Amino acid sequence: MAVLTETMVRALIAAGLAAPSAENHHYVQFAWNGVDTLTLQESPAAYPPSRVFNAHILSLIGAGAMVENIIMRASQDGFEVEVDETLGSLWRISLHFQAVAGLLADPFASAITARHTNRKWFRSPGLSATQKNDVEAQLAACSASGRVLWLDQPDQRKQALSLVWRAESERFKSAELHQELFSAVRFDVGWEATATEGLPPGSLEVEKPMRAGFQMMSHWPVARALSLFGAHRMMGLRAGYLPVRGAPNLAVIATTGELAPACFEGGRLLERLWLQATAYGFSVQPLAASCLLAMPGWRGVTPACASALQRGWERLIGSQHMPIALVRIGTADPVSLRTGRQQVSSMAVSGLAYKNPCQSLHRGLGGDVAKRLPLCCAAAARAGSCRQQAQA
């Protein structure tokens, strides 16, 4: 029986960590049985208490993207993967690997390391009709319940623009959503440096004249005061409406069924679409707010906004499908700055010989000091060692 080696396991985990996540951080623990099974389990200890539901849903979508990456990367080593998922209040996914002689590598696995978000302005050309058909076929082959729906007709685009503008504006108007949005932005690294966790502001493609104002808007009292004069609408216009309006292609990943499996499946489909578009040479940006804020139970959104988004999506794609993520696709200039990715060396991986040197420190600290330590110690690259940060 062929088994995974430590080198293979590290490569698979690295592929998983290269998948997209809401805050450029995957809340996950990995475990390898030493033979042929790799387990991923949600690690929610650092979720903000007021946003556990939101973080859990985002983690499910991220888990789907991670699993898709791992499956595609495994194909390059000649392994097929059986997925055993438990998607309850905490998700747990076991991946069982089987060597298959003559297995062809997934044609889009090579795009895993190239995939990134591009927030610049998009222009033509976009996907051709043939490429759209190929995307649909690829997604249909890996999912019985999910699909990609194109919103490129004028009436469809008009409806989608209304939903995007409403949702993106809400993120600057609601205290909870505002905190959720800006907590991920790493203003501490400045506008020129990248980061392996969180979103370096330079990756957001905020125009230089607008950077000071954008950073001021990260303070809730300022954002709340300016929203009285419609600033949230202007921010929603710039963040969502205008980028979507000019994109050659707009697609929504939609699934059916219960919320948890629908989000997990949606994450897998989102990643496959993203990798395929990347392999074709196009730029991609997901804009998930209009989908997420429409989900029952989403924290921070007003009932009026949630209801309007739900009705809008039902008119646009029907009541049988649940929108998971909206994606714009097109041609764009290279990004100004790419975000880094969590490293395998920053993770506590059961079954691997490597041990995170900061684990013992984390266990020995408590209270507010422990909370101040960066998740999984990937932030050792930010400011020295965990011990230095704990003593600061």
Image: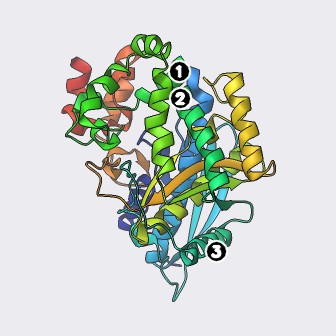
Judge whether 264 appears above or below 113 on screen: above
Given the image, on which type of amino acid does mark 2 rest?
Ser
User: Which mark, by number, is residue 358?
Assistant: none
Answer whether labels 2 and 1 touch (C-beta < 8 Å): yes
Quarter of the image for the C terminus: give it: top left
Side (left or right) of 297 relative to 348: right
Determine which quarter of the picture holds residue 302: top right
Residue at 63%, 30% (x, y): give it.
53
Residue at 74%, 65% (x, y): give it.
144
Residue at 59%, 32% (x, y): give it.
166
As helix, strand or loop, the secondary structure at mark 1 comes to helix
Q: Residue furthest right?
A: 320
Residue with the mark numbered 1: 173
Residue 374 % position (x, y): 34, 31
Residue with the mark numbered 3: 137
Given the image, on which type of amino acid does mark 3 rest?
Ala
Residue 178 % position (x, y): 48, 23
Judge whether 332 appears above or below 182 on screen: below
Residue with the mark numbered 2: 169
Judge whether 136 appears above or below 257 on screen: below
Determine which quarter of the picture holds residue 159: top right
Q: How far apart, in angstroms, are the residues tagged by discs 2 and 3?
A: 35 Å
